[in-house]
Image (tube, rainbow, N blue to C red):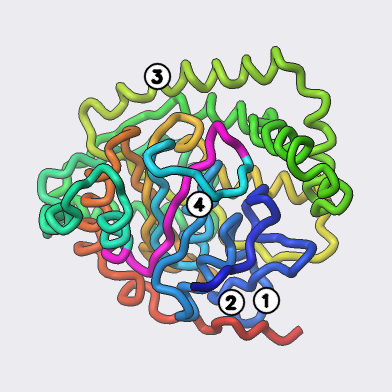
Amino acid sequence: MGKTHMVEFAFGGTGQNAHYGSPYNPWDATAHRSPGGSSSGAGVSLCEGSALLAFGSDTAATVRLPAAMTGNAGLKITKDRWSTDGIVPLSFTFDTPGILTRSMADAAFAFAALDPFLGDGFAFLRRVPAGVGGIRIGIADSWFWEDCENGIADIVRAAIERLARAGAVLKEKPLPEAREAYAVFSEGGVSAIELRAFLDRELPDWLATIDPVNAPALKNAENLSAREYLTRRLRLQTAAQSTATRFDDVDVIATPTVMFSPHVLVDETGPEQFWARNRKIVHNLVPVNYLSLCAATLPVGLDSIGMPVGLQLIAKGGDDERLVAIACAAERVLGTPREILGVPPTSLRPPKR
């Protein structure tokens, strides 16, 4: 068992850690690109072979994000399906344990072994379909696609079309509640104030040494009123209730996992630039957490600069078993990550500067 580098308190999606260094994305041998966060080292460990299964927490993206950016599979389960005991809290409202693996087949095996609601995990694995015939896939609306860069949208759409040719039933599926969820996140969400409350109570001395990119957000959290905090929670609760009906006629909704290629990390990045970039890369991921859904990501190709591209499959909260089975079936049609992507050009060896 090993422990990997990650973002301090899981508060951020780029993988940056001012204290211990930021892991390198193995898919670029010449530049220090983001591996995604907050479970940044988890994705890297799978690429370089030191792990077959990596654990992380997904509060607003951060199991699926590093999985997608490093060419691995990731699973964000429904909130409270798995216990958060032993996890240092970022947000008690949204913290969710999750897993990263080198394939969805491995993720299904881990899910079968770990999930407390399955009963006979081996029986679940035997029920995973061999193909995608009859599976109803909703294609998310343009909000999830229109800002994709470096050919990401085309790669994901091509993967979805392959699933359709294999028998999946496609349907356009708007998810307008995602905009409201992302708006709440962009306004500050609830993580900063919930982390600040934890630090004030349990680790007050830590605030003096917090990662400089996160210090302003935690300082500003002091000014959030109880009224505004509760208003944000109620807005999300209302949106989540409405979202549940979007799955009445589809099994999953498909989106690109991340709309942007992993960026080159720079040491001098300040808080404002850091959080602007962070908001961009979690755009398609935050709604899953904020709308009480579950989701999986699996790699489907390399973008025009040679970085991994992920397909996100979103399911109704509580439909975790169906989600894992569908994601596995999709992988059987599309191919395993190694078949699709090949091997990363570098592993743990830092590129020369």
Mark 4 or mark 2: which comes first in sequence? 2
Find numbered disc 2 in the image and state the secondary structure of the residue it sits on: loop
- Residue 120 is labelled as none
Residue type, label 2: Asp
* Nearer-N-terminus badge (1/4): 1
Q: Amino acid at mark 4?
A: Val
Note whether 161 is above or below 285 in the view shown.
Answer: below
Q: Secondary structure at mark 4?
A: loop
Asked whether the residues under the numbered discs 1 and 2 touch, taking CB atoms below 8 Å apart as contact, a structural biologist would say: yes
Position in image of residue 167 (x %, y %) = 12, 50
Report helix, strand or loop for mark 1. loop
Residue under the image location 70 percent in, 37 percent down: 198
Left/right placement of residue 215 relative to residue 20 reads right
Q: Toward the viewer: 309 or 236?
A: 236
Residue occupying image coordinates x 34% and y 33%: 317
Q: Specify whether residue 104 is painted magenta.
A: yes
- Please give the residue where the numbered disc 2 appears in the rendered image: 28
Numbered tag placed on residue 241 in the rendering: 3
Residue 275 in percent (x, y) is at: 73, 45
